[in-house]
Amino acid sequence: MRTATGACGLEVGVRQAGPPQDALTFWKGVCVAAAMLAVAVQHAMPFPPSVMQAMGDAAQADGGSEPASQDKRGYGREAFVGGYMGYPGHLRSDVRLQRPDGTDVTLKSLRWDAEPFKFPIYAGVRATQWWGPFGGMIDFLHDKAIARTGRGAHGAKVTGERAIPDVVEAQGTIKGAQAPSSVKLTDVLERLEFSHGHNMLLPTALVRLANVSAFVRPYAGFGFGAAIPHVEVWPAGEGDPARTNEYQLAGTAAQFVVGLEIPLSKGPLFIEYKFTYANLDTLLTTGKTPSWCNCDFVSDFSRHIARWWRGEAPLLGSLQTTIATHQVVAGAGYRTRP
């Protein structure tokens, strides 16, 4: 072990085999989360009574019909739809690969790249409803997670460090033989990515905190839902018949959010920190999304329902991993209910 200085001035331990950038990415995310949470907590207390009374008097003088408690806290009932973009940073995770050829191997501490500004870009859409200080939203997030196989998403050429396939620790068996202590990732998997999306559908409960000002409203929330990745797993040296390229309902996902909302006449602007966690249990089926744009959910899920109905096991085994991600996003909404 050696130490690296994180973005908050902390010294954190990193493995000799891994670059310090991973630790720095993690601590940058922690710093952003801590700063935004501190702002939210700082302003969670009610305004002093004198300020509250003054705001109420001002609202009445302006002819406002809302009760003073609503006006000073922004606790009205409203709904909006919106979208956002952002920057994610994935944490390392283990990958377990099980196949009927005698392979049952765990590849340790894989790195994941996101390529948020390359098509398809990192983005999300949501529908939010507030009832006073409490609310809820349906949040759909499209992210990408690409293992270090020397190529970018969909086999795109990359340069620098990313052009070198990772060498990772391995435990278990590969094709019936004991796995070496370390392997080059491309000796096992030619491609491993969730790049037509590491998608998540996340119903989320929200709470508004007291206003920072008349124009800034902090909020926080927790959501739990489903992971719907596009699974792209290509075993090394086995060609197209062994490849899986399809959307799957692959497991559960959750998120924690804390953000600041700026109300405007047509809808809010918002900036938000998100931490998401997805537990992926994917199937190696040889299935192919039959659309040129890799967006045919219907045919992929129809095949899965048919396999489940017939009680069929996946032809080529399974792959399990987790994807945990720090994210900072910014977006805007259009108010549908004032």
Image (tube, rainbow, N blue to C red):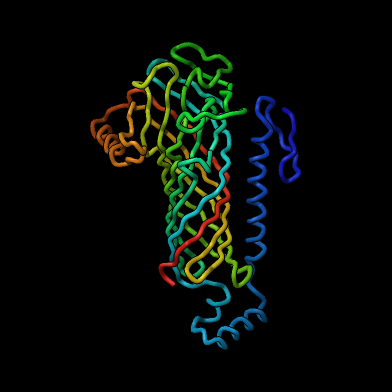
The C terminus lies in which quarter of the figure?
Answer: bottom left
Question: Where is residue 328 shown, x and y percent of the image?
Answer: 58, 50
Identify the image quadrant of residue 148: top right
245 is higher (above) or lower (below) than 271? above
Q: Residue at x 75, y 38 (%)?
A: 5
Q: Residue at x 59, y 83 (%)?
A: 56
Q: How many labels sit on residues?
A: 0
* Front position in the image: 231 or 162: 162
Question: Where is residue 23 shown, x and y percent of the image?
Answer: 66, 37
Question: Where is residue 33 shown, x and y percent of the image?
Answer: 63, 51
Q: Residue at x 67, y 63 (%)?
A: 42
Question: Where is residue 280 shown, x and y percent of the image?
Answer: 45, 36
19 horizontally vs 138: left or right: right
The N terminus lies in which quarter of the figure?
Answer: top right
267 is higher (above) or lower (below) than 285? below
* Front position in the image: 286 or 117: 117
Q: Residue at x 30, y 35 (%)?
A: 304
246 is higher (above) or lower (below) than 102? below
